[in-house]
Structure formats: structure tokens, C-alpha cells
Amino acid sequence: DTAVSQTPKYLVTQMGNDKSIKCEQNLGHDTMYWYKQDSKKFLKIMFSYNNKELIINETVPNRFSPKSPDKAHLNLHINSLELGDSAVYFCASSQERGGGNTIYFGEGSWLTVV
Amino acid sequence: AQSVSQHNHHVILSEAASLELGCNYSYGGTVNLFWYVQYPGQHLQLLLKYFSGDPLVKGIKGFEAEFIKSKFSFNLRKPSVQWSDTAEYFCAVSPSNTGKLIFGQGTTLQVKP
């Protein structure tokens, strides 16, 4: 079983559309994250939730809205998609919120906005 | 601002050559250090990590890294690379109690058979 699973793996959509990416972890972890990897492969954190509470919110357009219905799920909703949103989005989780925890990544969701 | 710098952007080696990838970070406090690998088309996998103790850490697939606190460095090494090591390598730092990973820009390693 995949520890951190996200769907869809590939998504091609038009500018202006609204889309969601879902993420689930079965590791029993308390903390979940969304990272964005751009076309130059640079990885940057977007959000982090601990037990359904938002704890990290980096400088991300408010078109991006994370939702955590429970601590095993963290979904990412994107409104009014723009060309620059094309990237790979990685969901991740860790046991606790501290820096001393290993972060486990999902397989990524390749988003292409046309 | 906290940052991580990987000196080599693209490294090309022949099989059996030795590898060293540089990583430096800028943060004055206590940090935890990681190396992740991303094989083509796949997700990030943890190679090794340093939290405390022996500054020379061993990871999977024969990789090791050495934390040198005075140099703010955490270089990755492997004595003899294989074609299957072709991948993207990311150094990452997590300042204690922040809960986030700060990544370097990655190093593309290409191993020629």
C-alpha cells in the first residue's frame, strides 16, 4: 500500500478552470504538507497542517486553498488556474510538526495548464 | 533568510567513479539535514538524514554524508556510482521546530554505463 497517495497523477486543464488534488496518508502521521516543484525542479513548501490545523502558509496566491477534513487527508483546491501554476505538486506527511521528523512524499501530481 | 545551496547543478560520471555532491546551508541555529533522491518520473525518496550524534551518516544504496558544523555543510558521497544512480539529488534543511524542509536547487546526476 502506498503510504502517501495523491490523485490525480496527471491533470491537464485550461486556464481559468478550478481543480482539486487529493491526498491521503495511511502512516498515522499528524502533519501533512503540500510542496510545489517548478519547471526547474525547485521544491518549495506551500502549506502544512497539523491535526487539521493550518501551521505553515507560505507566500502563495489565495487562489490556492488547502482543506484538511481529518488528519489523514489534505486536499489542495486551485481556483482560476493560470499558466504559471503548471508544476508538480507533492503531498507529504510526517509524524509530528517539528523539524526532527522525516517527511515522506507522495508520487506527485503533474498539473499542466494550457 | 534560510537557504540551501547545492554547488553542482549537473554532474556527469562514468560507472564506478566516485561521487561527491556539495551542500551548504545558511542558518545559525540547530538544524536537521536530509538528502533526498528523485529518480526520473518518480517521487522523492529519503537517502539519509542527520539529526544528532555521529556527523558521518550512512544511508541507503551505499550513500553517506558528512555534517561539518563549522562549514555549514552536508556533502553527499558514494565511492562507486552505478548507472541506476542517475537521478536528481536534493539537499534539504529543517530548522528545529519549524516543521518545514528548505530544499536546495537540486543536482542532476547522470551516470554513463
Image: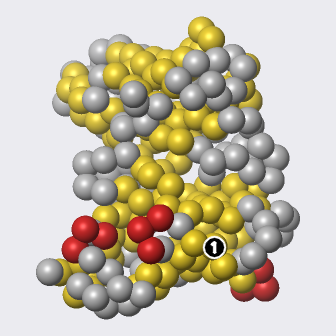
For the C terminus of chain B, give its image quadrant.
bottom left
B98 vs A19: above or below: below
The residue shown at (53%, 67%) is B59
Which residue, as the protein is rendered here, is positioned at the far top?
Answer: A69
Relative placement, left or right, of B25 versus A17 is right
A72 vs B30: above or below: above
The residue shown at (45%, 52%) is B45
Of the pair B68 and B79, the residue shown nearer to us: B79
Q: Which chain's residue wears label 1? A: B
Of the pair B107 and A40, the residue shown nearer to us: B107
The residue shown at (37%, 56%) is B38
Of the pair B23 and B47, the residue shown nearer to us: B47
For the N terminus of chain B, give its image quadrant.
bottom right
Q: Position of residue A81 (x, y in %)?
A: 35, 24
Q: Position of residue B78 (x, y in %)?
A: 44, 81
Label 1, secondary structure: give it. strand
Residue at the disc numbered 1: B57
Amino acid beneath label 1: Val
Q: Can the viewer see residue B53? A: yes
Relative placement, left or right, of A25 versus A51 is left
Relative placement, left or right, of B71 versus A75 is right
Q: Position of residue B111 (x, y in %)?
A: 23, 78
How many numbered callouts?
Answer: 1
Which residue, as the protein is rendered here, is positioned at the far bottom?
Answer: B17
Quadrant assignment, res B109:
bottom left
Q: Position of residue A45 (x, y in %)?
A: 57, 43
Quadrant assignment, res A18:
top left
Of the pair A8 and B53, the residue shown nearer to us: B53
Which residue, as the protein is rendered here, is positioned at the far left?
Answer: B113
B41 vs A21: above or below: below
